[in-house]
Image (cartoon, coloured by chain):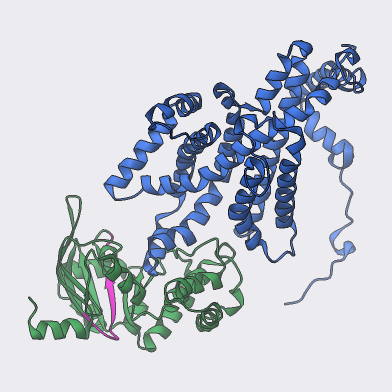
Amino acid sequence: MATQTAEMTNHQNAIQMEGVHKWFGSFHVLKDINLSIRKQDKIVICGPSGSGKSTLIRCINRLEEHQKGKIFVDGIELTADLKQIDRIRSEVGMVFQQFNLFPHLTALENLTLAPIWVRKQAKTEAEEMAMQYLERVKIPEQAHKYPGQLSGGQQQRVAIARSLCMNPKIMLFDEPTSALDPEMIKEVLDVMVGLAESGMTMLVVTHEKGFARTVADQMIFMDEGLIVEEAPPSEFFNNPKSDRTKLFLSQILQH
Amino acid sequence: METSINNKSSRGIDLPPPKTEIGVWGWLYKNLFSSWYNTLFTLFGILLIYWLIPPLIEWSFLKADWVGDSREACSREGACWVFIKVWFGQLMYGRYPIEMRWRIDIAYIILAVSILSLFIPKFRHKHWVGVFLFIGFPVIAYFLFVGGSFGLEHVETTRWGGLFLTLVIGILGIVGSLPFGIVLALGRRSEMPVIRTLSIAFIELWRGVPLITVLFMSSVMFPLFMPEGVNFDKLARAIGGVMLFSAAYMAEVVRGGLQAIPQGQYEAAKALGLGYWRMMGLIIMPQALRIVIPGIVSTFIGVFKDTTLVLIIGLFDFLGMSQAAITNTNWLGFATESYVFTAVGFWIFCFGMSRYSMAVEKKMHVAYKK
């Protein structure tokens, strides 16, 4: 029974997680996660591997199921209702570490597939929009190439454009640059910075400190399934409060 | 950046490669005589060819009898292809009435033209040909072959035989098994326990019994369970049995392909909001089927050859007719000619399928090439 205030909060926030727990078998991977992300927030989640950060964002579009607690995306509660899940998924875009482009389709076809089949757009309309997004990620000339013919950085940019073609309200990024060669990381981060500046709500799991400092409104540090610290980047990097955060930062700042 | 001019004098003179590297001698040297054991194998191979090929050519061509109408024309020095000539009609059509064979021929022509049209690169209405082949053609073929309406005389299915019957059972078995196999494979991977259990049970049951018993059951046992007067055509029952049997095999082949698709593909499709059937139809199946084309075509070829088992229920397919021909009292002793002819016939179809599958694979790999 949500109170009037609670309902209002739920509807205002892009993502609301309340008391969320998740287990993989007997392994407790998410422990009492409480998170409020407002529209146009840019949140960066970092932490050691195995801390549950990927699992957390994958719960938001139901690629993983939470066993306890509530998750609200754009005011809609995430439950086992398949229709709701599909609706939420078309409002939430996701970019994967391994790009996950569809190898049997060209870049353009990758982009137009969902708008045509989910939003029922006409092919010409979808292609026009897709070309616009390809220009936005600066690779319009690759439209008719297959993913196997593109570099990693280009593939990831196509993947970002593919998610954007569904006009999502929220974009989730699961370590988008971790599988890229260093010289390609910048081109992808530039696209993400541009996206942030255009006002997209973004939830990014990454280790890229430069990006975090530039773009993030809030840093979240996770360790062993818990949210250990939450602070704006300046505070987070310069004045971490928890010992675990300090340890983690000392490890990554070495590089 | 300065582009350097390709100048022989700046790089020295280009020497031609040694004779053993290029041309005919080069190929011979590298492939046949490159080491002492290779040379030995080559010599052994040449010996084998010398032993086998001339007698074969002599038997099947040089000393063979091609002209004649009856047994007397066979000198028995070589193959007597007169035997095949005399029996050709039955080997092709079984005991289908001779004056009605044109109905089968018309269907062959329609089929050949439709399929050939798919090979023309510039032809733009291939989708309609596909629809016709799967929906229109079977209906037309049914009325042509069975008759009984549109002024065509009815022909009992027990009279169907020869290559015609093999093609009917083979094509229907193959075309029916793929969609059904896909559905079973998806069912087996389903998260819903009832569907999964039913799929597994079906697959394991139909894969676990020999096709002979399936045909036997369909022919002898099935009618016992039917109420009085309900009579399914024997051929229809056999075709149904072949379809279900090969669907079970196909299901496992397709499941192998589904397993090879990385989890990320499923996730990316779901993340875009594609529902289950769209994800399967647009993303997963095109990739999975592509991967297992060798397995699928192998299963097709297997089904095509398995059709020969219908002899057990009294239907005379291509092989069955050739058996009937050699046990005919007038034509005893021509087993070799008969089996060679049947083997070559099957080989042509199976090799054709195999070649076609390679062409399909090649075409689809264009998408993955750099």
Left or right: B136 with respect to A46? right
The image shows a total of numbered marks equal to 0
**Which residue is at the front of the view, B176 or A29?**
B176
- The chain letter corresponding to blue is B
**Residue closer to the observer: B44 or B293:** B293
Say which quadrant the C terminus of chain A sits in. bottom left
Within the image, what quadrant is residue B251 found in? top left
* In magenta stretch: residue A43: yes
Q: Position of residue B244 (x, y in %)?
A: 47, 38
B288 versus B9 height, above or below: above
Bounds of the magenta segment: A37-49
Chain A drawn colour: green
The image quadrant that residue A167 belongs to is bottom left
Give the image location of residue B160, x and y in percent: 65, 32
Identify the residue at horizontal 84%, vertical 41% (top origin).
B21
Q: Residue at x 9, y 85 (%)?
A: A4
